[in-house]
Image (spheres, rainbow, N blue to C red):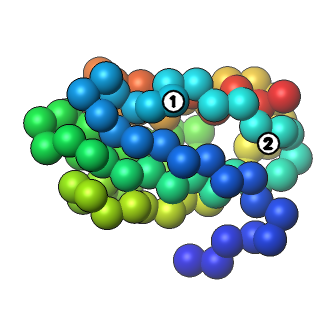
Amino acid sequence: MSVPKDAQLVELAVTKEGFVPATVNVKSGKPVHLVVTRKVERTCATEIVMKDFGVKETLPLGHPVSIVVTPKGPGQYRYACGMDMIAGALRVQ
């Protein structure tokens, strides 16, 4: 995967509390490079789904997963586990 040079780096972890941080602030008009690492075995968040961007990625335990998305404009873009029980949001300003 090629990560644009101007991408905003966001690191997320899956812990017993869910996605940490649960809300992330980013700037509009720039790609966002998410690096998601699942740090707990017992969780339903074994994948991340971002319906607004057509993202559905498996999150193997202990292995960072890179995802690049480009928000179309300001607003909140949800990320969640495959069962949609654990969630968070990209807040684009």
- Residue name at image x 83 percent, y 63 percent: 6
Q: Earlier in the sequence, mark 1 or mark 2?
A: 1
The extreme bottom residue here reads 2
Q: Is residue 91 above or below residue 33?
A: above
Q: Is residue 65 above or below residue 70?
A: below
Specify few, some or many for label 1: CA neighbours under 10 Å numbering under 14, 14-19, or 20 or more: some
The extreme left residue here reads 42
| Residue 23 found in image quarter | top right
Give the position of the C terminus as an image quadrant: top right
Q: Which mark is residue 21?
A: 1
The three-letter code of the residue at mark 1 reads: Pro
| Residue 25 found in image quarter | top right
Residue 69 appears in view: no
Specify few, some or many for label 2: CA neighbours under 10 Å numbering under 14, 14-19, or 20 or more: few
Residue 71 appears left or right of 86: right
- Image label count: 2
Residue 66 appears in view: yes
Q: Which mark is residue 72?
A: 2
Query: Residue 51 versus residue 57: which sits nearer the camera?
Result: 57
Q: Dot 1 lies on which element?
A: loop
- Residue name at image x 48 percent, y 43 percent: 12
Residue 59 appears left or right of 44: right
- Residue name at image x 37 percent, y 52 percent: 37
Query: Residue 60 versus residue 39: which sits nearer the camera?
Result: 39
Where is residue 63 drawn, in percent x and y?
31, 63
Foreground: disc 1 or disc 2:
1
Asked if marks 1 and 2 touch (Cβ < 8 Å), the reply is: no
Q: Dot 2 lies on which element?
A: loop
Residue 43 appears left or right of 14: left
